[in-house]
Image (cartoon, rainbow, N blue to C red):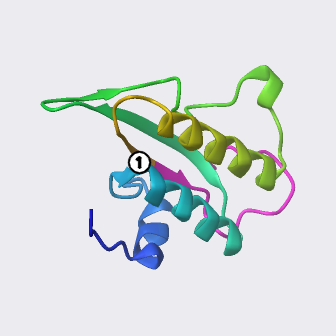
Amino acid sequence: MGEHWDMGAELASAATGRGTSYLPSETAIAFIDYAIERGAWIQSMEAFECDDQHEYLDLRYSIKGLTAEEQTTDRSRISEISRDRVSSALAAPNPYRFKLWAAPLNIPETGNPSPR
């Protein structure tokens, strides 16, 4: 608790191969909203369940690609899927941390949402 996140710096990092810092769930939701407000969208996301000693990659809440039902080029829908997955992790018994990547801000509004 009490951590301060520079969302501008996180967004700049998210648009590179580094991705964001490992963000707690609530901060990840705020970051997704911040990215959307600036015309970016969440390209991929890793979710890590944290216990007292370890962190475990959890693919249930990660985005490595969209399912057939989720396929869309609508940025707002892609970001909604991201937000929904983070929100779902909030109900889990252990806390989660997320690493996110945002599509570069200069990708056209329509077209394939995959990286170049």
Q: Is residue 32 left or right of residue 76?
A: left
Furthest-left residue in view?
A: 53
Q: Quadrant of the N terminus?
A: bottom left
34 in relation to 71, above or below: below
Tell me which residue sits at (41%, 55%) in the image.
Answer: 19
Kind of residue indicated by mark 1: Lys
Badge 1 density bin: few <14, some 14–19, many ≥20, Cα 10 Å: some
Given residues 33 and 115, the one toward you in this image is: 33
Secondary structure under the numbered disc 1 in the rendered image:
strand
Given residues 107 and 102, the one toward you in this image is: 102
Which quadrant of the figure has residue 27? bottom left
Across and down, in percent, residue 9 comes to 40, 75
Which quadrant of the figure has residue 46? top left
Tell me which residue sits at (61%, 52%) in the image.
Answer: 42
Q: Is residue 48 left or right of residue 85?
A: left
- The residue tagged 1 is 99
